[in-house]
């Protein structure tokens, strides 16, 4: 599934310091429980990836693929376990999105995991726009997951959507 967001600047001055992100709470139930999910930032793919703890028995993977269309922007990522780590309101997600990457291990879990992944900071020119995409992908195994990530990026980069 591809989600497209066009961020427009209707003003006469360039907007700087813009961020765009996607908050996800993927609940995998292949193992019979939501409590053993692990979310990881897969640096080689540039995606947030969720798997069961026991990937030998449950090799399925789902993830969120951030795709900037026609501009460069740094990626940002943050993850936590359970609703206790959720911000109190939507404004509370800004520090998570704008914080870059956390120190230490990029994996969180096992547990009821949530994450935010996105871009920023980037600029939106005066009278212009930036388009960002988020692909929600899944697969039966890691090889197929990687192929689906590549296919999502290729679809956006080919245009015509």
Image (cartoon, rainbow, N blue to C red):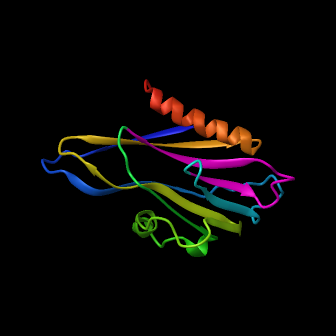
Which residue is painted at 73% across and 45% down in the image?
142
Query: As rendered, which of 131 and 84 lies closer to the eye?
Result: 131
Could you tell me residue 39's position as x and y percent? 65, 60
Which residue is painted at 62% across and 69% down in the image?
105
Residue 5: quadrant of the picture: top left
Give the position of the C terminus as an image quadrant. top left
Q: Is residue 15 left or right of residue 82?
A: left
Give the position of the N terminus as an image quadrant. top right
**Segment colored magenta:** 47-69
Query: As rendered, which of 91 and 157 lies closer to the eye?
Result: 157
Q: Is residue 104 left or right of residue 90?
A: right
Could you tell me residue 63's position as x and y percent? 62, 49
Q: In the orientation shown, which residue stands out farthest toward the top?
A: 160
Which residue is painted at 52% across and 31% down in the image?
154
Which residue is painted at 83% across and 56% down in the image?
31
Q: In the orientation shown, which residue stands out farthest toward the left?
A: 12
């Amino acid at each position: 599934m591809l989600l497209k967001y066009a961020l427009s600047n209707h003003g006469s001055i360039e907007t700087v310091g813009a961020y765009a992100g996607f908050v996800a709470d993927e609940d995998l139930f292949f193992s019979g429980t939501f409590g053993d999910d692990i979310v990881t930032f897969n640096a080689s793919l540039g995606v947030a990836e969720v798997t069961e703890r026991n990937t030998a028995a449950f090799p399925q993977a789902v993830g969120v693929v951030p795709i900037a269309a026609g501009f460069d922007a740094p990626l940002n990522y943050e993850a936590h376990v359970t609703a206790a780590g959720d911000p109190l309101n939507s404004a509370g997600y800004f520090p998570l999105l704008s914080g870059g990457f956390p120190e230490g291990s990029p994996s969180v879990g096992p547990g009821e995991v949530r994450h935010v992944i996105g871009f920023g900071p980037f600029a939106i020119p005066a009278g212009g726009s930036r388009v960002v995409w988020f692909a929600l992908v899944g697969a039966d195994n890691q090889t197929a997951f990687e192929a689906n990530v590549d296919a999502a990026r290729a679809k956006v980069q080919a245009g015509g959507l």
